[in-house]
Amino acid sequence: MGSLDKLLEGFKQFKQRYYIAEPELYAKLVDRGQTPKILVIACCDSRVHPAQVLNTNPGDIFVVRNVANLVPPFENDGKSHGTSAAIEYGVKHLKVEHIIVFGHGQCGGIKSLMAGGVGLEKGSFIDPWMSTAVPARGKILKEHSEKSFEEQCQICEQAVIEVSVKNLLSFPWIKSRVDAGKLDVHGWYFEIEKGILFELNQKEGSFSSIC
Ligand SMILES: [Zn+2]
């Protein structure tokens, strides 16, 4: 029960801040609804919660989290696509102005992919999900065979951000908004050991630190 007690204590503090000390914020969010301008696509990893890492307030960011912050390609096949549905809601209904693919260091999903663990467990949900990133693995094993496993994982973590950014642009209603200057798509990488934020240069396919 210790872990849950911590959550209840956390909720009390949250309530104190947003309902008692600053009641205007939620009153407005309830009255007018949410109007976040930014959609963040992040990993499920407990160390990289976007609202915590980016220090946002309630109502600031619309967040989609999945294993390895992947965006699958646009597939209009009538099947259930959770990540694509959330992206659609953020773009079409909330009309966000920015989408950030928020990748991170020491990603367990990427580590498993690079170790070749993906594809081994029959009936796993993770395997088909990670298939979006499999081509990136093949490329890294070929082009960076001399690098250590840790270095290959980091290259893959960043490559997967690039894949997700490209896949976002395969959604016609994202591409049209980007072309019209109404929406910007970004790739960010949170290096968790030193706490450094990197940004993807989409033309060059490289990352540089921004914060
Ligand atoms: Zn991760």
Image (cartoon, rainbow, N blue to C red):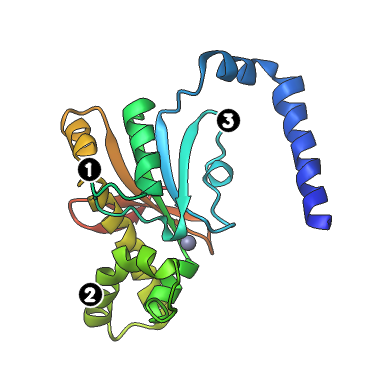
User: Which one is in front, 170 or 197?
Assistant: 170
Tell me the CA gap for discs 3 and 1: 28 Å
Instruction: Tell me if residue 158 comes above or below residue 12 in the rendering.
Output: below
- Name which residue type carries label 3: Pro
Q: Secondary structure at mark 2?
A: helix
Is residue 110 in sight in this rendering?
A: yes
Q: CA distance from mark 2 to mark 1?
A: 24 Å
Q: Front-most of 83 and 141?
A: 83
Comparing marks 3 and 1, which lies closer to the viewer? Answer: 1
Q: Is residue 95 visible?
A: no
- Residue 84: x %, y % from top left: 34, 45
Q: Residue at x 81, y 42 (%)?
A: 9
Label 2: few (<14), some or many (≥20) within 10 Å? few
Q: Is residue 72 above or below residue 85?
A: below
Q: What residue is pinned by disc 2?
A: 139
Residue situated furthest bottom in the rendering: 146
The residue that label 3 is drawn on is: 58
Q: Is ligand 1 less than 8 Å from the beta carbon at label 1? A: no
Q: Which residue is mark 1?
A: 171
Q: Position of residue 195 (x, y in %)?
A: 52, 56
Amino acid found under the numbered disc labelled 2: Lys
Residue nearest the viewer, comparing 200 with 72: 72
Q: How many labels, in total? A: 3
Bin the neighbour count of mark 3 within 10 Å (Cα to Cα): few under 14, some 14-19, many 20 and up: few
User: Residue 108, how many percent across, how many down?
Assistant: 49, 69
How many C-alpha atoms fall within 10 Å of the one at disc 1: few (<14), some, or many (≥20)? Answer: some
Residue 166 image position (x, y, % from top left): 23, 52
Q: Nearer the viewer, residue 66 or 59?
A: 66
